[in-house]
Amino acid sequence: MTTQRSYLPALTTPPAQAEQWQDMAGQPNEAFLRDDARVRELALALRSVISMRKPANRDQTESLVRAVADHLYSQRSISRSAKNGGLPSSSLEKVLAYIHANLDRSITLAEVAELANISPYHFTRLFKKSTGHSVHQYIIQQRIEIAKRLIHEGQLSLGEISLRAGFFDQSHLHRHFKRHVGTTPAAFAELCKNVQ
């Protein structure tokens, strides 16, 4: 009997074991020091899909792996902030908190630039340096995360989810969800049902 090697535990390494994950300078990699609920959720879904061992699950597996990579990249991007000439961390935190609190409605560039007390043109450049994403991309990415959570909870229709996540309608959600996650909201909902 052969044992199946699992690559998933590396995604959810407890902080006590994090010292084995070091960067090139020998310092612990901060990505492995945090307990990330989103990575844990994606890892469990990925484990479930892999355990089914069906060729049809390849697309689901790829979309979950992409979601983990995107999440880890976005967390890394936010931490580099002002070190690379981006927004000061206090301004970035204020802007991100405002965006997260208002994702269910339309957010204008002028609003968020005003929070940082700089012109919209300058703000867009500094925000992208700080996060690795344009303001619009960041907002869409956060709305997708809300939609994924609501779909996973399974309490609302896709139409209701699209409005609660801040999309104009269900087709707006569908277009961005497929682009970012690699699958449709309905297929993701079906995957979530299979995982539970």
Image (cartoon, helix red, strand yellow):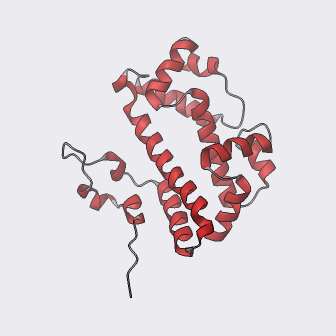
Q: Is residue 4 above or below residue 100?
A: below
Judged left or right of residue 95, residue 193 is: right
Side of 9 relative to 69 (left or right): left
| Residue farthest left in this picture | 26
Q: Which residue is depicted at the point 41% across and 55% down? A: 35
In percent of width and height, residue 180 lies at 61, 44
Residue at figure coordinates x 38%, y 73% from the top left? 5
Q: Quadrant of the C terminus?
A: bottom right
* Quadrant (top left/top right/bottom left/bottom right) for the N terminus: bottom left
Is residue 175 positioned above or below 40 on the image?
Answer: above
Residue 44 location (% of width, % of height)? 51, 65
Residue nearest the viewer, comparing 1 with 147: 1
Residue 190 position within the rendered picture, expressed as x and y whole percent measured from the top left: 70, 64
**Image location of residue 79, percent across then percent down:** 39, 36
Residue at the limit of the structure toward the bottom, as seen here: 1
Residue, far top: 119
Residue 113 visible in the current orientation: yes
Instruction: Please indicate, yes or no, whether residue 196 appears anywhere in the rendered image.
Output: no
Toward which corner of the image does residue 84 lie, by quadrant?
Answer: top left
Query: Is residue 67 or residue 75 the one in the foreground?
Result: 67
Near-viewer residue (154 or 186): 186
Look at the picture and state if 109 lies above or below 159.
Answer: above
